[in-house]
Image (cartoon, grey):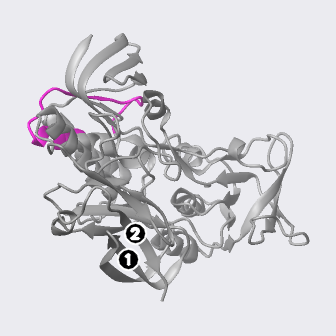
Amino acid sequence: MLNYDLVVVGGGPAGMAAALRARDFGIKDIIILERAETLGGILEQCIHTGFGLHYFGEELSGPEYAARFIELVEDQRIEYKTDTMVTDVSEDKIVTAVNKEDGLLKIQAKAVILAMGCRERPRGALSIAGTRGSGIMTAGTAQKYVNMDGYMPGKKIVILGSGDIGLIMARRMTLEGAEVKMVCELMPYSGGLTRNIVQCLDDFGIPLYLSTTVIATHGTNRLEGVTIAQVDDRLQPIPGTEKYVECDTLMLSVGLIPENELTKNVGIKMDRITNGAVVNEMRQTDHEGIFACGNVLHVHDLVDYVTIEAQTAGEGAAKYILGQQAKDPVYVNVTTGNGVRYTVPQMVNIKSKDDIKIYFRVGQIYKNAKVVLTCAGKVVSAKKKVKLAPGEMENVIIPDDVLATLAESDEIKVEVAES
């Protein structure tokens, strides 16, 4: 049995930022466990720019963003093991992992930070009729083929789903000489950032069809085409709107799923909307000493926000290890009102001496609406927003002096008020 103060599961941007923050607070015995061959996570295959604008104040590619944190991890001499798969985390914070050099590892930790990231929703999760011909893949898989393996997956592309990876791959495939026929989105709004719609679709003349989906694929050995159709307000195909589109590749960008098998195995309370753990303002789960951050907690739109959240988790874990957590915390729930799908954190300690930032996402597009924060039935803030979209994360701040006025029976609510 090995012993460490802090075990970080995942060596992507969240795991590295959390470990570095814990080191800033004086935690020396830290180990990062990463299943890939290198640190950096998904950023290693994201060669496009657009990372770091909020955190570093400059535009970086994914590998450049990751490299800055890898360098800091090595400078701080934080131990890490790559090509290492964590298979279990127990309630008493024993982490089981395996790799080809050490064999089976068992590590007793004082605190654990879960930062496993997320995965793409595969074809098997969709009800698309057709055979299993080659040429159907997730957008992230295609991104790896092109950016890391130097392999073009196809020449005539249809993209289903308007998530950011799909939008970015529309541009990438066009730059590589492929013909991107269209991007189809089931919902009446895009799931990606506005800037990606402009830079990746509009600038290249690639059409985006909203309220449209793929209802069938054609071809046996290799994809030869797809049938698309418009959908109604119940998301069901509308008869008579079917259209055949010739293509040899269908890329799926239909959502990301937090990698929470380990989290569930511990018995941690989960949020059915985010598919991540329920956490407090320091990103601690309902299991004392186990924290979660990054895309394993909820899918973020920007890696900069992943970093900031991971630093919060790293600070929380450090204070837990050092016995500096708030004594006798009193938690109140953060609930969602009109228009808000979820919040993170889902509960906050009203004895906190700091302002608390609540992140949230809306369920549809709003224009010229107000984000209303209510505490104990009283409106604390009503901030006007020109636009709110499901693809972009928002936040509100609860001032510490407001927290001090609340009681355990009170409630905090975030909602959208339409003008």
The answer to if 117 sits in the magenta stretch is: no
**Tag 1 residue:** 372
| Magenta residues, start to end | 19-39
Mark identifier at residue 132: none
Q: Which quadrant of the structure image shows residue 308?
A: bottom left
Given the current orientation, which residue lies at the most extreme left position?
26
Q: Nearer the viewer, residue 329 or 355?
A: 329
Instruction: Using the image, determine if residue 359 lies above or below residue 195.
Output: above
Is the residue under label 2 in contact with that under label 1 (CB below 8 Å)? yes
Q: Position of residue 144 (x, y in %)?
A: 52, 44
Question: What amino acid is found at the position of numbered circle 1 in the picture?
Answer: Val
Residue carrying label 2: 414
Q: Nearer the viewer, residue 129 or 264?
A: 264
Percent across and percent down for residue 7 are 27, 28
Q: Amino acid at mark 2?
A: Val
Which residue is at 37% across, 52% downward? Answer: 62
